[in-house]
Each structure stands twice: as structure tokens, then as C-alpha cells.
Amino acid sequence: MQILVTGGCGFIGSHTSVELLNKGYDIVIIDNLSNSKKEVIESIKTITKKDFKFYEGDVKDTELLKKIFTENKIDAVIHFAGFKAVGESVQNPLMYYRNNIDSTLSLLEIMKEVKCKKIVFSSSATVYGNPQSLPIKETFPLSAANPYGNSKLIIENILKDLYVSDNEWSIAILRYFNPIGAHESGIIGENPNDIPNNLLPYIVKIASGELKELNIFGNDYNTKDGTGVRDYIHVVDLSLGHIQAIKKIINETGCDAYNLGTGHGYSVLDIVNTFEKVNNVKIPYKIVDRRPGDIAACYADPSYAFEKLNWKATKTIEDMCKDSYNFIKNKNK
């Protein structure tokens, strides 16, 4: 069975590609390398000892998509490709709407044309906006607090409308909470091309001496220590959720959404303190103003994913912090 992975050189895409290959799937990757590196392709091959096709290009390029579907027998798609920084989306909303929505529409139009109607979509917990209660269930009202989240919500609605129009489609919408960590081999991990937008890669760059100190955006939230609380999930656990979603959509039609999280909330200072403890390093930080679009707390009720996908996260916050640092140390050897 062959899976097209859009954005397969990115953080979550590369780890999911490894898990797909390890589980016996064939894959094809398309990535424009706007926030990833081509060397990841060889890293995936090194870990899995398996080969696959890679197309460098943009998912908005319909001619390239036609070429991919013509040259390969694609059974299903996992769609990761898209911009993903909350702060940047607030500053440049048009770029986010144009890129994230256009690329998805191009992909879906070509999939419809070639009658490949099975897709796993990389969504986000940001579609819940500022939740009125915790933990967050899939049945909660949806309303994004920033353009990044809104672009994901718009795409979710497009997918739901698509299924209503044609019940042959099989669609799994995966709402990620906060992926961190790295592959235990230390060969792949989160390594953005520019200054990191996410907490743990920033901490790792401080630990390795690339950056001086961590900015903590606000310590006046209504949380146990005033810093933002999130549901951090190991990227390998998250990747295995995609394997379970592929099994689901291959065997039945429908359109459904699933939370992929641990069900536990950790504050920014929890992460800093755990990282310092398990890696025996010091992370200097300073408190700065809140970021536009951020909310106080967000963590999942992942029970529906366990019930329907037979999936649950098993790795600990210590694993996440240890594996992230191991990746950078390995990369800097």
C-alpha cells in the first residue's frame, strides 16, 4: 500500500514517514523544503533502511501533483504541508490563508480527479479557540483564536463538506496538541530553518549554546505557576496515531475528527525544569509579554482516539525532553 506524505520532510512528517516504512507501507514524499531540509530524506532512509520517491515542490502545484499520481499508485494521502506558527499567522494572515487553504484545495481537486478519496489531515487543537472547560473533547465548539488555527478550521469544514457531497470519501482529521521530542535514534528531530516558534526546539538551542536565553511569553495566566499550560505529546506517539488513522480510512468511509494528545497539561516552567533535570543543563529564561493569539491552558481528552483508533500516547515528558536534547547533541557531533 502506497501513501503520499505531503510535507514529509518536516518534523511530524518525517517521523510519520519512518513509522509508515517500519510498518511495511510504501511512501512518496512531496515537500518544498520551505521549513525543512533535504538531508532529512537520507536520514529517514538511514533509520528504516528502505527507499522511497521524493518530489521537491509545492502542493499548490497541480501539474506536479498530477505527475505524482500518474507515476505512482497512491492509495491514501497524509497531508502535513502548511505553515504552522501562531505568532507569524497573526502578523501575516493572508500568507497563511493563501498557503494552507490553497494547497489543500489543489490536493483535494487532484485526488478527486484520480479517484483517490482517502486522506488523513493534519489539524490542530487551535481549532478549539479558548476552551470554556478542560479537558477538551472533540464535541466542543470550534472557533480559532488566530489565523493559523482558523486556516485549519476552514480546511476541516472543507473536508466535512466534501464528504457530505460524496460519501465515498474517507477522511480522518487529527487535532494535534503540542508535539515535541525526537526519534530515539537521534537522527531526526525538530530542526527548523529559522528561529524556532515552538518551545522545546528553542530550549534545545539554548542548551546547545546556539541561543542565549528563553523568552517565556507571560507569567500572569490563570495557571498553577502563571505560565501557559499545554498538552505536550511525543512526536513518535503522534506518528503512530497516523498509522492507526490510515488503518481506519483504508477500511471504511466517513469523516471524523480525533484528538491526539496525552490528556495531561504541563506548564512552560514544567518543561524547563524537567529538561534541566533529565539533561543536567541550565536553561536561563526571562518573562516577556504574552504573545498575540495565545491562550492560558489547553489539554486533550484523548479517549475518543483510543475508542475509535485504538491509539493512546505512552511516552513521558521526561522521554520528550531527553530525546529532543539527544537529537541536537547527535547533530552537533
Image (cartoon, rainbow, N blue to C red):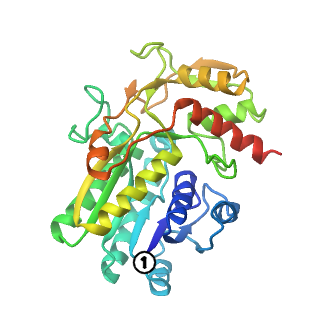
Q: Quadrant of residue 120?
A: bottom left
Number of numbered discs on residues: 1
Q: Quadrant of residue 242?
A: bottom left
Q: Is residue 99 above or below residue 233?
A: below
Q: Nearer the viewer, residue 175 or 132?
A: 175
Q: Nearer the viewer, residue 88 or 129?
A: 129
The percent position of residue 145, horizontal first and vertical second, equals 35, 36
Specify the amino acid type for callout 1.
Ile
The percent position of residue 103, horizontal first and vertical second, equals 43, 65
Q: Is residue 315 above or below residue 116?
A: above
Q: Left or right: 95 with respect to 185?
A: left
Instruction: Kindly identify the residue that appears in the image at 34 percent across and 83 percent down.
Output: 114
Q: Nearer the viewer, residue 256 or 104?
A: 256
Quarter of the image for the C terminus: give it. top right
Q: Which residue is mark 1?
A: 74
Q: Is residue 188 above or below residue 171?
A: above
Q: Left or right: 174 with respect to 226?
A: left
Q: Quadrant of residue 38?
A: bottom right
Instruction: Kindly identify the residue that appears in the image at 69 percent across and 65 percent down.
Output: 42
Quarter of the image for the N terminus: give it. bottom left
Instruction: Kindly identify the residue that appears in the image at 51 percent across and 57 percent down.
Output: 16
Q: Is residue 239 above or below residue 165?
A: above
- Say which element carries label 1: loop
Q: Residues within 10 Å of mark 1 (few under 14, many from 20)?
A: many
The percent position of residue 132, horizontal first and vertical second, equals 25, 26
The percent position of residue 298, horizontal first and vertical second, equals 37, 30
Instruction: Kindly identify the residue that appears in the image at 30 percent across and 80 percent down.
Output: 115
Q: Residue furthest bottom?
A: 70
